Image (tube, rainbow, N blue to C red):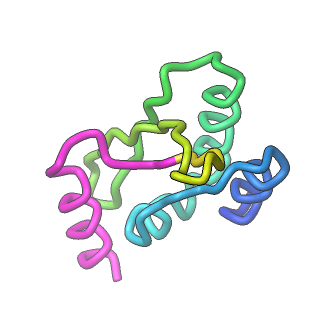
């Protein structure tokens, strides 16, 4: 099974800094393989960059991959909840599953 470190290695191999909120990183545990596939497809421009993250409470949150550049010109890959409520849903799901 893949780990989140594998996801980070893909970004590192492409000299891309991965930016992920700690709650999202924690919530992805157990779904690394599909997350990895979604990330690879996004980086190859084969997908729209939306990942449906299942939550332990039975719901899901849509995550968005986006590529940017830092003020110094370095490539960044951000992973964010698509809606402002999404991060709150992820945090609540983590609290109830712990």
Residue 1 in sight here: no
Residue at 72% in and 65% down:
5
The outermost residue toward the left is 85
49 vs 57, left or right, is right
Residue 81 in sight here: yes
Which residues are the magenta region? 78-98
2 vs 42, left or right, is right
The outermost residue toward the front is 72
Q: How many marks?
A: 0
Residue 50 position, x and y percent, is 43, 30
Q: Image height check: is 64 above or below 79? A: above
Quadrant of the drawing holding the N terminus: bottom right
Q: Is residue 86 magenta-colored?
A: yes
Give the camera-side residue of 6 and 79.
79
Q: Is residue 82 magenta-colored?
A: yes
Residue at 17% in and 49% down:
84
Residue 68 position, x and y percent, is 52, 40
Residue 82 position, x and y percent, is 29, 39
Q: Image height check: is 23 above or below 36? A: below
Residue 20 position, x and y percent, is 48, 60
Residue at 54% in and 37% down:
67
User: Of helix, strand and loop, which mostly describes the magenta segment?
Assistant: helix
Give the camera-side residue of 32 and 22.
22
């Amino acid at each position: 099974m893949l780990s989140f470190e594998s996801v980070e290695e893909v970004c590192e191999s492409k000299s891309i800094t991965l930016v992920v909120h700690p709650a999202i990183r924690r919530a992805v545990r157990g779904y690394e393989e599909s997350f990895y596939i979604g990330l690879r497809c996004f980086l190859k421009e084969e997908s729209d960059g939306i990942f449906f993250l299942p939550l332990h409470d039975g719901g899901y949150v849509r995550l968005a991959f986006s590529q940017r550049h830092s003020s110094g010109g370095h490539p960044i890959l951000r992973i964010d909840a698509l809606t402002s409520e999404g991060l709150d849903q992820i945090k609540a799901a983590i609290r109830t599953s712990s």
